[in-house]
Image (spheres, coloured by chain):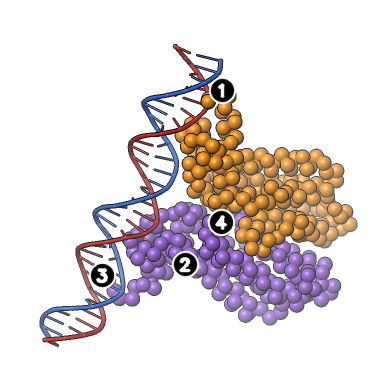
Chain colours: A orange, B purple, C red, D blue
Amino acid sequence: MPKIGMEPVRRKALVDAALRVIGDQGTLSVTMSDIARTAGVSPALAHHYFGSKEQLLIATIRSLLARLRNDAVAALRAAATPRERVSALIRVSFRADQFAPETVAAWLAFYSEAQRSEDVRRLLVIYARRLRSNLLASLRALCPFDDAERIAEGAAAMIDGLYIRQSLKSAPISIEASIALTEDYVTAHLRAAGGGNCPSP
Amino acid sequence: MPKIGMEPVRRKALVDAALRVIGDQGTLSVTMSDIARTAGVSPALAHHYFGSKEQLLIATIRSLLARLRNDAVAALRAAATPRERVSALIRVSFRADQFAPETVAAWLAFYSEAQRSEDVRRLLVIYARRLRSNLLASLRALCPFDDAERIAEGAAAMIDGLYIRQSLKSAPISIEASIALTEDYVTAHLRAAGGGNCPSP
DNA sequence: TTTTATTGATTGATGAGTCAATCAAAAATA
DNA sequence: TATTTTTGATTGACTCATCAATCAATAAAA
């Protein structure tokens, strides 16, 4: 029963399905059939709308990034002080849906893919840069520039590290513990660097 | 010119080739032909010795882990104090060959694979546990138990995070900078936790 | 009738795993 | 020592399955 105006609906359904299947199987070598079946359409339709598997994957990463950016923007809007903004960025990174095993698995798969696909790599670099520069912008108000850079680098690394460790879910680090660990890092180093100019969260 | 006793030679050659090709392409969906060609033998021989692609991959991870363990053991032997042992463990993680882009890419591919293969997952869990417990053993001599656990967790996460960020090689963090960042983390938190009982590296 | 949505059937490529055959060293036998 | 047998190393050719991508056909809206 073909209705008109299905294109945006199908596109979204396919992207969401791709994310779910990739997260579930933890690999990009999922088939177009897997994705299409999850979206409730035929494989041919997936090709019709996206042209190729690669393009569908790109669209999927973009949607992940968009979600992350929206969350970050909203969280930053609600934060008043620089120190609160840092905390907001950390919290966004560990939101329940972002930190869910399937989402982590999907991110991991994309990182792995970045070795081969220049397009994928570029998108992930955008994410890394955004996180770093968001942190840096707030930290610069709290301590000398050089220290801000180091702390931003370290915090970003710790966030990514907690993610990758989460993917093995052998040592199930809770969301709260992950946030606390990262907060502690920032607090300790601000204290060491700021020279009194650094309030606690 | 078939010589006798080739089995161990071929096995090693195939494992090394697998590591190189996987690191190079950044994915486990390399073909047995790719690996065999790199090792200078026919695909059939790879199957002859390893039975399946999965088994060859397992053997490859094992060799990575073995290398890491040997390095760690050697480094620990040369370290006298607990604090030196912590530094030694950090340095081992960032040795030039471990931190090389191809090696990092291979690790990433294995992490991604761990979602599907229970065997791969188990091996990676072993690595994560070993790093954590090695750090913990030394840290417990330097600060209260609870703090030692948190610091070990944080340092391990930071190490893994610096790895994954290295894989994008967009912000080329040097080995020395990575070591310094992790050392700073440990030093700062030991100072905060130890209460005087914590010497600098 | 034209356009949009949709799919079943098909194609072409690729890749894991198998198998029988070959070659040469080593061991056994004459 | 000379000859035969056995065993390990090695591969080319093949099978079977999978999957991305294509295409022609159908059905409903406009």
Residue underneath mark 2: B59
- Of the residues shown, which amino acid type is indicated by label 3? Met
Residue underneath mark 3: B1
Whether residues under marks 3 and 4 lie with C-beta atoms below 8 angstroms apart, the answer is no
Residue underneath mark 4: B115
Q: CA distance from mark 2 to mark 4?
A: 18 Å
Camera-side mark, 2 or 4: 4
- Of the residues shown, which amino acid type is indicated by label 1? Ile
Camera-side mark, 3 or 4: 4
Location of residue C29 by image quarter: bottom left
Q: Quadrant of the C terminus of chain B?
A: bottom right
Q: Is residue B180 left or right of residue B19?
A: right
Position in image of residue C10 (x %, y %): 34, 35
- Of the residues shown, which amino acid type is indicated by label 4? Gln
Chain letter for mark 2, please: B
Q: Do dots 2 and 4 share one subunit? A: yes
Position in image of residue B97 (x %, y %): 54, 65
Q: What crowding class fits label 1: few (fewer than 14 Cα within 10 Å), some (14-19), or many (20 or more)?
A: few
Q: CA distance from mark 1 to mark 2?
A: 54 Å
Q: Nearer the viewer, residue A191 or B152?
A: B152
Task: Tell me what residue is drawn at x 68 percent, y 81 percent.
Answer: B80
Compared to residue B105, the image places residue A89 above or below, namely: above
Indicate which disc, 3 or 4, sits on the residue closer to the N terminus. 3
